[in-house]
Image (tube, grey):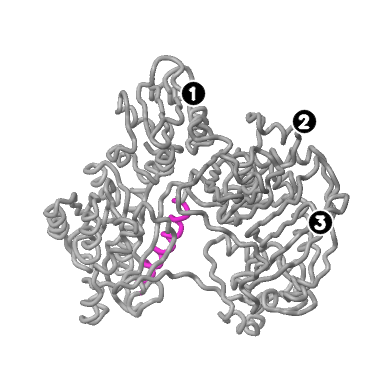
Amino acid sequence: MAGPLRYDGKVVLVTGAGQGLGREYALLFADRGAAVVVNDLGGSFKGEGQSTRAADKVVEEIRAKGGKAVANYDSVEFGEKLVDTAIQNFGRIDIVINNAGILRDKSFARISDLDWDLIHKVHLRGSFSVTRAAWPHMKKNNYGRIIMTSSAAGIYGNFGQGNYSAAKLGLVGLSNTLSIEGRKYNIKCNAIAPSAGSRMTETVMPPELVAALKPEYVAPLVAYLCHEDTEETGGLFEVGAGWVSKLRWERTQGAVCRTATTKMTPEAVRDAWKDITDFDNATYPQSTTESTRHLIGILGDLDGGLGGKSSSRSSSSSSSSSGGGINVELAKAAKIKPTTFTYEPKDAILYALGVGYTTKDEDYLKFLFEGSEDFSVVPSFCILPSQASTFGSFSGGVPGLGVDVTKILHGEQYMELYKPFPANGKLTSQARVADVLDKGVGALILMEVDTYDEKKEKIAFNQSAIMVIGAGGFQGNKTSPALKALVKPPKRAPDASMAEKTCVDQAALYRLTGDRNPLHIDPSFAAMGGFKQPILHGMCSFGFATRHVMKTYANNDVSKIKAIKTRFSKPVLPGETIQTDMWKDGNRVLFQCKVVETGAVCLMGGYVDLYEGAGDAKPATQPSSGSNMKSDAVFEGMKQQLASRKDLVKKIKAVFGFEITQGGKTASEWTADVKNGDGDVYKGKPKSGKADCTIVISDDDFVDLVTGKLNGQTAFMQGKMKLKGNMMLAQKLGDLFKDQAKL
């Protein structure tokens, strides 16, 4: 069982902490090791008056128990003053609990400008002001946890609280946006709607209910959401009386009230009202991306003509045999025309470059030079003939699969290889619909493809699990024995890991292998989908994982690879680092891929099956050699950071040494020379003299450090990080590698 959640080394700012919920938050965080800024203006619940007593009393309680706390008496309108209190007293700010609030309850007709403005100034603008002041500190530290306090009145409305409910729902919107903008910096933001007895709730709740809804039944949720191990962000939670629940938006399938040739009229809306308001097959959108994709799909339907139908629900619920909607049996019985795929060595080489093979590694030349004696085609190349057959089926139309191709997402992939691909050839692929599953929010289509060589011998088999958003609700099966199962990795540490940084043009290169989706190249198209830049193809990440496993456990021998399976769980941005963690189990290697910079798992439940004889192979590169270490990718990123900031040598003037350990022994050494010439980052000891400051840390802890999972001060105090030489110079590493490290 995991140990208690602690907040040692963290600094927490709680607004409105003089009593009620705020006081409970402050006491709980202090009891768990955090330093707390107790903010309270000391006025009435209507926002009148001011006093230092409320905040002082809570500070006294914390200090009496041996905790660390300081009072602040400023209004939340002046957020910088509150945050300055944290910085001046504790040197940092990690967690902000926006809890301060007042009430000015009036029926809508009686709300004055003052009633409206005061509520928004404290609740919405106050939370904005405090969070804005803390934001740059959190970005610099690559760590932050923020809580916005909403209310049931904001979610559902409440008589006499128009001003209050408007501000409280506004905080949910602010929280949602901050959760998106903060992801890059490890800043998590969530909103809560608490039910607890307080000076404010006693005006709208009966006394016995106020007494039962204790603040101590709310504070644990807030503490959990603010812990460094918590990944939750962008959530909205109702909490009270020991009960916690997460809320989400629900949307009907809706209806299209026009066609490509007719106008939208009030009468069309009236006639479609039943479908517009029918929640029987509701979906649960979670982002603007989903909303945008839905609208793109509707426009696609209109461009193709809706045949005069007013309801878009027909695209997801129809079982017509004419091809509209989903008809599982008709789709499974469909005869799909075979496709051919012709390739040459240059096509195989282009694919190898697209999935990260490089001439820097001599072991990879066999995949990049057609003149190599043992020229080989990467096993995952077999997706290309399969992909042409699979997606060609959608665009050509399959009876029983009336789906919108703009809503297609690649969910999972399985491939099985019966023999290595030749250097060139003409392949024939036969696709079929193995099953269609009703997942509610969409239809999961299992496409299977057999690929044959020129001798008509089966060379490969592929199964693609394709999700079509919005096409669910046709009352089909939710599971299928045909779907190749995923396998969870063991809970133990990986037996081997390999991390490599993708290049900024990785997606631009990979798309030349055949997947020309503009999502992977056009920034404006990516932005329309909710991404800050074009994303990497999931099958490109798949290729990275295949390559990592094959190098580690099969000595780059393509004949050893039997089958590969994984699920695409999160996108990767070109330039980010893909780390493949591997676990050996007989002839099966289980793997999971994550983005080193964010910690997000991008490929999950994966495995590679090896042919008999490869199962006893040891990792091609032992950890003690220093290669394939997780930290290598970080140092490569540091090298790029230094090259782009020539001013740092004059600013820092120091040589840093890094001793990266595994199993208690030094496994790798790196040098960051920010003192001589233009500076450099390279493997090994300093080329001349010795380092001014040397950092000794394990490979895992170093990666946790740079990704913000491990605090630098905590690492040093716990002995996880040791410093030699001029220890004070370590503070300058933040300037040197501010986008790479948190030291």
Measuring 75% from the left and 32% from the top, which residue is drawn there? Answer: 369
Q: Is residue 97 above or below residue 381?
A: below
Find residue 729 and report its horizontal and vertical position in percent: 33, 27
The N terminus: image quadrant: bottom left
2 or 1: mark nearer the eye: 2
Please tell me the numbered disc located at residue 349.
none
In terms of sequence position, does the residue under pointer 2 or pointer 1 come before the other?
A: 2
Please say if the residues under marks 3 and 2 sit with CB atoms less than 8 Å apart: no
Which stretch appears magenta? 162-182
Element at label 1: strand
- The amino acid marked with disc number 2 is Glu
- The amino acid marked with disc number 3 is Ser
- For disc 3, the neighbor class at 10 Å (few under 14, some 14 to 19, many from 20) is many
Alpha-carbon span between mark 3 and mark 1: 50 Å
Q: Which residue is mark 3?
A: 429
Q: Which residue is mark 2?
A: 373
